[in-house]
Amino acid sequence: MAEKDDKRQASRADAVRGAAVQAFQATAGQAGVTRERAQELADELAQAAGRFVGALDELRPASADEIRSLREDVRALETRIAALEAAATTAPAAAAKRGAAARKAPAARKAPAKKPAAAKKPAAAKKPGTSS
């Protein structure tokens, strides 16, 4: 009878081992799926965090360095505009001087004879309150 008990214990041990192996195999298969899903969730979380940081950057006020840089840019633009305005005001004066000199030079030519202008007819008086 001792042999029967040993065989039963061996068969019970084998049954327990078999059940444990099956449980591990089933869990291992699910672990692969779970690992993939966990990786997908981590990726989605990282993307959401990136969008959140981007939104915060857009909402935050400008820093002192950024404001200082913008002020320098505005000063540079003011200088450029002042130079352009100065050039624009001196250019017509120089052109007027050149134009006056150019107008005096052709005086040596004889001017064509002028024809008398035709007499103009008086314009009709407008009545108040009418528009044309």
Image (cartoon, rainbow, N blue to C red):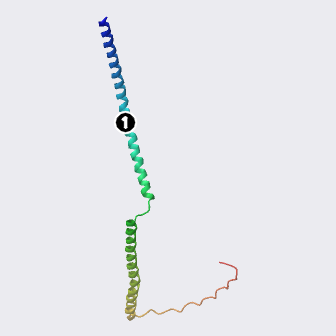
The quadrant in which residue 65 appears is bottom left
Taking the image as shown, residue 127 lies to the left or right of residue 17, namely: right
As drawn, 24 above or below 14: below
Taking the image as shown, residue 7 lies to the left or right of residue 40, namely: left
- Quadrant housing the C terminus: bottom right
Pinpoint residue 26: horizontal percent, then vertical percent.
37, 25
Q: Residue drawn at (37%, 68%), measured in percent from left and top?
A: 69
Assess disc 1: are there few (<14), some (14-19) or many (≥20) residues with their C-alpha within 10 Å of its C-alpha. few
Question: Closer to the camera, 67 or 4?
Answer: 4
Pinpoint residue 68: horizontal percent, then vertical percent.
38, 69
As drawn, 40 above or below 129: above
Q: Which residue is mark 1?
A: 36
Pinpoint residue 34: horizontal percent, then vertical percent.
38, 34
Q: Residue drawn at (34%, 25%), measured in percent from left and top?
A: 24
Question: Closer to the camera, 5 or 78?
Answer: 5
Taking the image as shown, residue 100 lies to the left or right of residue 115, namely: left
The kind of residue tagged 1 is Glu
- Quadrant housing the N terminus: top left
**What secondary structure is marked by label 1?**
helix
Most distant residue in the front direction: 2
Most distant residue in the top direction: 1
Pinpoint residue 110: horizontal percent, then vertical percent.
41, 94
The quadrant in which residue 10 appears is top left
Q: How many marks?
A: 1
